[in-house]
Image (cartoon, coloured by chain):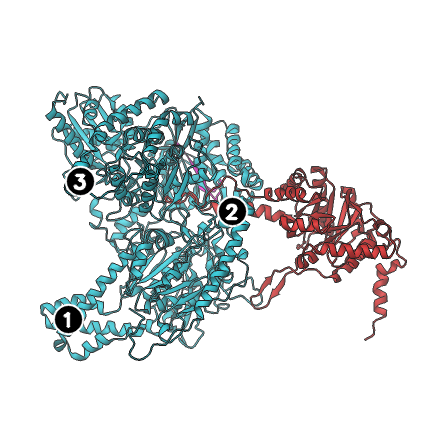
């Protein structure tokens, strides 16, 4: 038998490793935090990795989790061993099929990285609210609590379901286990084989549907029989728990790790016991050991098999001495007597008592508590609070732990300072930027230490919810025993700051243990660095007696050709200082890892990394720490003191990474937040910002139109408004007749700019004598920050021009204030310019329904949100329902608005005499097709309201509440291609088929961007994406053409970076069209694999190669006998290759298999040419002109 | 009539080589070249910048955004077989060799004697019969001397010479002060042949966009004259073989180049414009011409019109210029 290896990997990989080896069909759909499991499976199958029967499993991405569940159900029925991976909303979409699969007693084990189900807010993090929503489906539920257990239970689950015929839901904690990197013992193929007997597989197959032995399932049954038939499965459920235990016993004989349905750990005569499920159990065991060493008689009972819940095993597992039990649930069931596990325990004890199987000396008191929602930290300190509570005569029931509930006062207080980690566990915390490669290097370090030494290792990574300038915090532990601390490090021996700017933002040294080490990447050398530190940092260094090391890693990276990648440099420093390994050995291992990572990708990269490693130590210096604090500079406040109270008291705390400290009372009760809060978060992430030269500028405003973050803006204003302008504020005469005599300024928001350079690249204005100099040049931000901050403040205070005076074209659109600003989207994002444009044109009367995805994350992730308000306090109202229902959700807005409007109009009629016929006629007949018309209607509504106030009847009051709907509202349904082409397509189709006035904006990045680039039906032929690794073999779905087929849907295909004027026009037409409108927008994306500074160039190529033809299909044209389709871009004039060759998503397919790629490209080129021919044909149609008396066909 | 010739120690069935171009990337075109009777194939150049930039750039594009955001630890699949760098190129050398059995010359294009020259070794291992080094360097700094520019070229040749056993051809630009002196030094540095001349990309200017406009113009026969002159000057003065590239479009062009001293004639633009089958046309016309003029072998013609043997050598030197001026009347 093969020797088992010790490997380091995360929980998702550990699970997928077994699932891939034990299944034949894997149907999946990406959803955080389970996506990686499907990706691993797909990657392995693409590599030809085989399962234990020598077959490469078929991995199929579906259009939704509902689709995945359907495919799973079908594959199981047709006899394949089948699995899936999912979480949260995805799991909920599978529930209907889960009932069926269980009802048909199907052997099936699925794997879930348990995640919060969205309620008042979405959360991608871990708790049990999703799996608990499945406890009624008839699935067995198996809970693992660590990376090793996830690996083991994936196998036990598969074995047990084959044995019992009860389908299994194997779950573990999202992120805490799914993403924790840990050292485990790997199960060999022989291990897996011996747990999966052939005869059980054969039995599964024998139950399948086949015309050679035809049978039938899925009947409809009537009241006479359904009930009895439903009870027929009982023997299987009664037997299930024992069979699972039997598999656990077999596993123990094989691998040595012995699990039980309920695992008790602690004092055999404990008086207090915590019952818990998932990763919290590891922490509880760790605490129990610590407390027992201090004389406490306590224990923890870990629930492994939650369904079927075996009362017998449960009662037997508890010590007979127990007096008090706290059942901890990682989910919340509002309105229930208690949370689910608690209720199960109560019922189990009661039943045992009734049956006389209760063995307890005293009838134990049971309380329930909630912990760890959405990956909230669950620490030994919190466990201490729970055990202490249990020691009381009347322990509190239905408590929470881990938060401060100052409203309903359910929370247990705990001592946040308690730290039980032993000294022989080395702890290190690293603050880095996503872009600098810190996390990757740390994952590497864990691998090196855990696999090359006897140490156990654990890594957990905290990521940012911003995509541009994302901060990462890595928590690494190493020690001589298996690490059970499933919580973040509190006291680190080693703290590293990989970015100088963090010193002013985060209290990093709060993590430092006394006597520890602080490694700082500093532009200042060992002689100067001390004086540049803020006071708070100096104080902590002295107070905690920290050793301080500095390196100018960016300089080392620059000089060795590594660009901004400082990962291997900082990693070398860590090894050099920490002494985990002898220096030479460590450097050898780092190089080995570099070779392994990049060896196949190119010698140059390996060489440059080696050079960086070799240059590092000469540049690493220890700083002699002075005895006294010398700094006068203190860390700046997180937000301006001018910020609203909520922002100062709540948002700022979250921004400082201290949101855990906020009490319940700080929060709205229903998830409602004010808009326009990104303005208070000054992130200062740009190294360089644009500098405007008014003398060269041609005032086209293209810079502002393409800016993804609304960080560069134009304004026209009266000359006298320049009074009091800062000295460096730039202004020039406005060119053009519309605002003759006025002044013009392009102003950058220096602290909000991300430095993406799109504005400077798109700027067409070159200095004639030196064309390298443009109207916008990039320059270092630091020296400009202060002056430009003052200039920007002055700029914002200048009044916005009258909307009615602005001509709506590309240039004019940018004089409308953006009501979407400084979002957390990637630097150079291709989506946000569209969203911003939408808010500029219609934001003051827009309701936005946003599908889950990138746009909902940068649009609505706390702490601050980008949707903003104009000077009148108007702005987009925004909500995100789900991924799959966005069109329907937005359609619901429309239904509500239409009924409000109908009622308002009805009441206007009713009250016409009192209001005044003229005003009523004007209100009802208002032309709101222009900004002027809308402004006039707003005035009429104001007049109406003042009249209504004098009327005072109940009808008048009702009309007053509805009057604002007399001003036209614009409903926008926004989402990505994953929503529009795949999971939400059914709803989208239904909504556009209804004829009501909604606008759908599809931000088409051609992959699931937010979850990491999985293929959607929008992914183009020939491009690689996850689940289309060899290049997508089918052409992109032509969503526009499908929508056009309805005939009464306005459809436009736009590419702002290629043809901005066409995009602005399409947005206006979409809004003005009185029926459904669909705008499909080309969005370049980091998942395409090129420098986004070239985003507009790629958009241009997409259009000019004919890959992305621009068009507007306006059913209103049919009336005039014209073709509704107007092609806005010429026939392809460049070969497709010219566009695709710039993008890694295509190049990687070519690199992997040039021959295959050539075929794909030939097909893709044909597809482009053919499709363009279709459009051209359609655009040339002449339509029969409507004759008198014929009903109108267009519009609604 | 014996058309065979020897170049870089390789026996060529005839002096016509398919010069370095994208044709060699396409196995189908390669087969057509062989059927048309080409004497040998020079591979498409593998560029130093291409190797370096592609590797660094692609890794940046893929990694810069990885491990930054909880929902997406990466944005690309990571297929095992995804290879950056020259592997594909090396594979193509093997395939060309296998498909044609003809002499195959690998081509490296670079400006620094850096690590990429290791690829010369890979090219050797992949089965190439020789290596052509295209030293494409434009001095732009006022402090860089002509001697330094020459030394750069020589260093690269020495580095590659030290790395491989294969014969090495050096493809030169015409912009050196003393080409015969450089030729001699290259010979001493270990070059086995000189290829004259490299055609630089010469960017145009877009006066609307104020941008340089990069495009590639195919050569014309007019460009041959510069080459004929330098072939004639070098022929017989250096021991290395000479080859011509740039401006050979017809059989007569080829014959002239041979007479000026080339033992191999590289065709590029004519094949790109008119297809691989053009090799056969040129070869047949050439053969007919030699036969009609009662040549027994091509060897008789090679170098017959060089500076040393030409009946009027001054035509290749300064006299050429003087005479033309004298004949010019306003």
Q: Which numbered dot is residue A226?
A: 3
Rendered red, the chain in question is B
Does label 3 or label 2 sit earlier along the sequence?
A: 3
State left or right for residue A335 relative to residue B1.
left
Res B326 seen here: yes
Disc 3 to disc 2, C-alpha distance: 54 Å
Region rendered in magenta: A516-529
Does label 1 or label 2 sit earlier along the sequence?
A: 1
Report which quarter residue A917 is drawn in: bottom left
Q: Is residue A522 magenta?
A: yes
Q: Which residue is mark 2?
A: A1149
The answer for which chain carries disc 2 is: A
Q: Is residue A496 magenta?
A: no
Does label 1 or label 3 sit earlier along the sequence?
A: 3
Q: Which residue is mark 1?
A: A907
- Residue A943: % across, % down: 19, 74
Foreground residue, A711 or A219? A219
Q: Which shade of the palette goes to chain A?
A: cyan
The answer for which chain carries disc 1 is: A
- Residue A722: % across, % down: 38, 69
In this view, the mark in front (1 or 2) = 2
Foreground residue, A210 or B207? A210
- Residue B293: % across, % down: 87, 57
């Amino acid at each position: 038998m093969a020797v088992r290896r010790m490997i380091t990997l995360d929980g998702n990989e550990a699970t997928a490793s077994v699932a891939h080896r034990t299944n034949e069909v894997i149907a999946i759909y990406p959803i955080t935090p389970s996506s990686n499991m499907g990706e691993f499976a797909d990657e392995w199958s693409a590599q030809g990795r085989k399962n234990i029967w020598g077959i490469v499993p078929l991995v199929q991405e579906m259009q939704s989790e509902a689709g995945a569940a359907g495919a799973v159900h079908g594959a199981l029925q047709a006899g394949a061993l089948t699995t899936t991976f999912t979480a949260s909303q995805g799991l909920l979409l599978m529930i209907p099929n889960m009932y069926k699969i269980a009802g048909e007693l199907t052997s099936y084990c699925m794997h879930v990285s348990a995640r919060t189900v969205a309620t008042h807010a979405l959360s991608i993090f871990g708790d049990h609210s999703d799996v608990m929503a499945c406890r009624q489906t008839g699935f067995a539920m198996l809970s693992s609590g660590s990376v090793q257990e996830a690996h083991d239970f994936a196998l036990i689950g598969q074995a047990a379901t084959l044995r019992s015929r009860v389908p299994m839901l194997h779950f573990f904690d999202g992120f805490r286990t799914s993403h924790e990197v840990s050292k485990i013992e790997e199960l060999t193929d022989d291990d897996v084989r011996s747990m999966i007997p052939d005869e059980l597989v054969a039995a599964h197959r024998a139950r399948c549907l086949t015309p050679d032995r035809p049978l039938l399932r899925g009947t409809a049954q009537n009241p006479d029989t359904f009930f009895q038939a439903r009870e027929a499965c009982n023997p299987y459920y009664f037997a299930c728990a024992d069979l699972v235990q039997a598999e656990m016993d077999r596993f123990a004989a094989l691998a040595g790790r012995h699990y039980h349905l309920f695992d008790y750990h602690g004092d055999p005569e404990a008086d207090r016991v915590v019952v818990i499920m998932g990763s919290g159990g590891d922490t509880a065991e760790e605490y129990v050991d610590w407390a027992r060493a201090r004389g406490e008689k306590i224990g923890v009972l870990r629930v492994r098999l939650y369904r079927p819940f075996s009362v017998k095993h449960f009662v037997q597992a508890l010590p007979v001495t127990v007096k008090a039990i706290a059942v901890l649930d990682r989910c919340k069931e509002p309105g229930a007597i208690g949370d689910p596990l608690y209720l199960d325990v109560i019922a189990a004890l009661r039943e045992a008592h009734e049956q006389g199987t209760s063995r307890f000396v005293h009838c134990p008191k049971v309380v329930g508590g909630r912990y760890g929602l959405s990956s909230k930290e669950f620490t030994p300190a919190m466990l201490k609070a729970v055990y202490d509570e249990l020691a009381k005569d009347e322990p509190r029931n239905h408590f929470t732990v881990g938060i401060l509930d100052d409203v309903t006062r359910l929370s247990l207080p705990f001592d946040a300072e308690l730290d039980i980690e032993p000294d022989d566990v080395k702890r290190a915390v690293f603050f880095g930027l996503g872009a600098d490669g810190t996390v990757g290097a740390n994952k590497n370090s864990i691998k090196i230490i855990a696999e090359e030494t006897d140490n156990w290792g654990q890594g957990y990574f905290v990521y940012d919810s911003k995509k541009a300038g994302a901060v990462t915090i890595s928590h690494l532990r190493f020690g001589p025993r298996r690490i059970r601390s499933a919580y973040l490090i509190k006291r680190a021996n080693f703290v590293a700051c990989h970015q100088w700017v963090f010193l002013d933002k985060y209290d990093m040294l709060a993590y430092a243990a006394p006597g520890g080490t602080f490694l700082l990447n500093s532009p200042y050398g060992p002689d100067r660095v001390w004086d540049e530190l803020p006071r708070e940092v100096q104080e902590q260094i002295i107070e905690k007696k920290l050793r301080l090391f500095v390196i100018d890693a960016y300089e080392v990276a620059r000089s060795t050709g590594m660009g901004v990648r400082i990962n291997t440099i900082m990693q070398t420093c860590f090894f050099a200082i920490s002494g985990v390994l002898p220096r030479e050995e460590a450097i050898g291992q780092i190089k080995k890892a570099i070779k392994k990572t990049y060896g196949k990708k190119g010698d140059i990269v390996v060489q440059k990394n080696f050079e960086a490693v070799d240059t590092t130590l000469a540049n690493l210096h220890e700083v002699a720490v002075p005895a006294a604090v010398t700094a006068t500079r203190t860390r700046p406040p997180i937000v301006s003191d001018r910020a609203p109270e909520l922002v100062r008291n709540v948002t700022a705390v979250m921004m400082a990474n201290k949101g855990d400290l906020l009490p319940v009372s700080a929060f709205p009760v229903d998830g409602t937040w004010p808009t326009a809060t990104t303005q208070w978060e000054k992130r200062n992430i740009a190294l360089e910002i644009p500098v405007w030269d008014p003398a060269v500028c041609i005032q086209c405003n293209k810079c502002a139109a393409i800016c993804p973050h609304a960080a560069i803006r134009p304004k026209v204003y009266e000359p006298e408004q320049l009074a009091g302008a800062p000295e460096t504020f730039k202004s020039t005469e406005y060119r053009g007749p519309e605002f003759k005599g006025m002044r013009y300024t392009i102003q950058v928001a220096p602290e909000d700019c991300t430095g993406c350079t799109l504005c400077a690249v798109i700027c067409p204005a070159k200095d004639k004598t030196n064309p390298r100099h443009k109207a916008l040049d990039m320059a270092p931000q630091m020296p400009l920050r202060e002056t430009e901050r003052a200039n920007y403040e002055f700029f914002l205070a200048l009044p916005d021009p009258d909307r009615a005076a602005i001509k709506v074209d590309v240039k004019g659109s940018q004089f409308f204030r953006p009501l979407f600003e400084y979002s957390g989207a990637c630097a150079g994002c291709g989506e946000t310019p569209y969203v911003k444009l939408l808010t500029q044109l219609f934001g003051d009367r827009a309701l936005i329904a946003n599908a889950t995805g990138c746009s909902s994350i940068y649009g609505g992730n706390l702490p601050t949100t980008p949707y903003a308000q104009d000077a009148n306090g108007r702005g987009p109202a925004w909500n995100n329902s789900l991924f799959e229902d966005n069109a329907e959700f937005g359609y619901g807005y429309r239904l509500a608005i239409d009924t409000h409007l109908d009622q308002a109009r009805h009441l206007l009629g009713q009250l016409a005499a009192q209001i005044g016929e003229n005003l009523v006629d004007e209100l009802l007949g208002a032309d709101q097709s222009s900004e002027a018309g809308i402004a006039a209607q707003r005035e009429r509504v104001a007049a109406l309201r003042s009249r209504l106030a004098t009327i005072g009847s109940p009808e008048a009051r009702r009309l007053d509440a509805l009057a604002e709907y007399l001003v036209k509202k614009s409903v926008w349904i926004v989402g990505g291609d994953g929503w529009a082409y795949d999971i939400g397509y059914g709803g989208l189709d239904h909504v556009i088929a209804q004829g009501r006035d909604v606008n759908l904006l599809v931000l088409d990045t051609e992959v699931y961007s937010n979850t990491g680039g999985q293929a959607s039906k929008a992914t183009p032929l020939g491009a690689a994406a996850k689940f289309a690794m060899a290049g997508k073999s089918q052409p992109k779905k032509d969503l526009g053409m499908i929508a056009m087929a309805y005939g009464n849907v306005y459809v436009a295909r736009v590419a702002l970076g290629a043809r901005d004027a066409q995009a602005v026009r399409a947005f206006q037409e979409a809004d003005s069209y009185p029926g459904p409108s669909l705008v499909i927008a080309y969005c370049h994306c980091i998942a395409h694999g090129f420098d986004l500074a070239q985003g507009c160039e790629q958009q241009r190529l997409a259009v000019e190669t004919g890959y992305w033809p621009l068009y507007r299909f306006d059913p209103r044209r049919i009336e005039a006998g014209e073709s509704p389709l107007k092609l806005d871009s010429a026939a392809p004039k460049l070969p497709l290759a010219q566009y695709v060759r710039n993008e890694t998503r295509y190049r990687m397919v070519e690199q992997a298999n040039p021959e295959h790629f050539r075929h794909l490209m030939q097909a893709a080129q044909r597809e482009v040419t053919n499709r363009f021919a279709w459009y051209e044909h359609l655009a040339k149609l002449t339509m029969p002109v409507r004759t008198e008396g014929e009903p109108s066909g267009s519009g609604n | 009539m014996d058309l065979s010739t020897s170049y870089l120690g390789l026996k060529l069935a005839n002096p016509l080589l398919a010069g370095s171009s994208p044709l060699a990337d396409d196995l189908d075109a390669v087969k057509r070249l062989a059927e048309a009777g080409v004497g040998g194939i020079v591979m498409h150049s593998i560029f130093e910048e291409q190797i370096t930039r592609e590797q660094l750039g692609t890794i940046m594009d893929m990694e810069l955004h990885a491990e930054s955001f909880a929902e997406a630890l990466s944005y690309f699949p990571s297929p095992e077989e995804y290879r950056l760098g020259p592997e594909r190129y090396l594979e193509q050398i093997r395939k060309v060799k296998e498909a044609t059995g003809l002499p195959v010359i690998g081509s490296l294009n670079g400006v620094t004697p850096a690590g990429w020259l290791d690829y010369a070794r890979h090219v050797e291992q992949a089965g190439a019969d020789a290596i052509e080094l295209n030293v494409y360097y434009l001095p732009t700094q006022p402090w860089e001397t002509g001697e330094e520019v020459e030394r750069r070229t020589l260093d690269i040749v020495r580095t590659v010479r030290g790395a491989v056993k294969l014969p090495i051809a050096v493809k030169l630009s015409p912009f050196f002060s003393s080409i015969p002196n450089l030729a001699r030094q290259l010979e001493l540095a270990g070059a086995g042949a000189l290829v004259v001349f490299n055609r630089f990309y010469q960017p145009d200017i877009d006066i609307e966009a104020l941008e340089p406009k990069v495009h590639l113009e195919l050569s014309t026969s007019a460009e041959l004259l510069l080459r004929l002159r330098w072939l004639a000057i070098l022929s017989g003065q250096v021991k290395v073989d000479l080859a011509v590239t740039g401006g050979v479009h017809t059989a007569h062009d080829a014959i002239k180049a041979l007479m000026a001293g080339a033992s191999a004639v590289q065709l590029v633009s004519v094949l790109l414009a008119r297809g691989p089958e053009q090799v056969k046309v040129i070869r047949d016309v050439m053969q007919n011409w030699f036969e009609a003029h009662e040549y027994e072998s091509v060897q008789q013609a090679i170098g017959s019109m060089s500076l040393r043997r030409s009946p009027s050598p001054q035509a290749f030197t300064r006299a050429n210029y003087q005479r033309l001026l004298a004949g010019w009347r306003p």
